[in-house]
Image: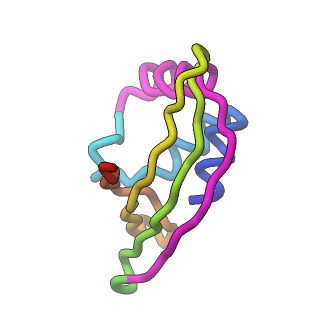
Amino acid sequence: MRSRYTAFALGKVTYLMDTVHPDSPHFNADRKAWTAELSDTCNSVSFLGLVILGSGVDSAQQGWVHFRAQLQGSDGVDLSFAERSTFAKHKNRWTYLTGEIETP
């Protein structure tokens, strides 16, 4: 999770795409369109901080990370959120599968 957050902050779009599980609803086979979408996000958001609230492994192939990300939009709006992300192994590497945003 820390590496993906850092990749968002640094605009490392290829890394972000390569660390999404192919079964994820966030996966996009059209890498050109996906690159543009992720680049827009990286360029329009300030990434101000990440706090890992917990993590665990459910099985040898699946685990989770609970985190809070502090973000700010280019218009100054607070975009911070908390999420419990699910990660799954793909080709022996942990990849982002999905996440549940916490509601206040």
63 or 19, which is in the foreground?
63
Extreme residue toward the front, this view = 104
Residue 77 position within the rendered picture, expressed as x and y whole percent measured from the top left = 53, 23
The stretch of residues the image draws in magenta is 29-57
Q: Colour scheme in the image?
A: rainbow
Q: Is residue 100 above or below residue 57?
A: above
Extreme residue toward the top, this view = 75
Q: Judge left or right: residue 70 versus residue 37.
A: right
26 or 28, which is in the foreground?
26
Look at 65% across and 43% down and name the residue there: 7
Residue 50 position within the rendered picture, expressed as x and y whole percent measured from the top left = 63, 53
Q: How many marks?
A: 0
Look at 34% across and 83% down and name the residue there: 58
Residue 5 position within the rendered picture, expressed as x and y whole percent measured from the top left = 61, 48
Q: Is residue 61 above or below residue 73?
A: below
Q: Is residue 28 above or below residue 22?
A: above
Q: Judge left or right: residue 89 versus residue 12.
A: left
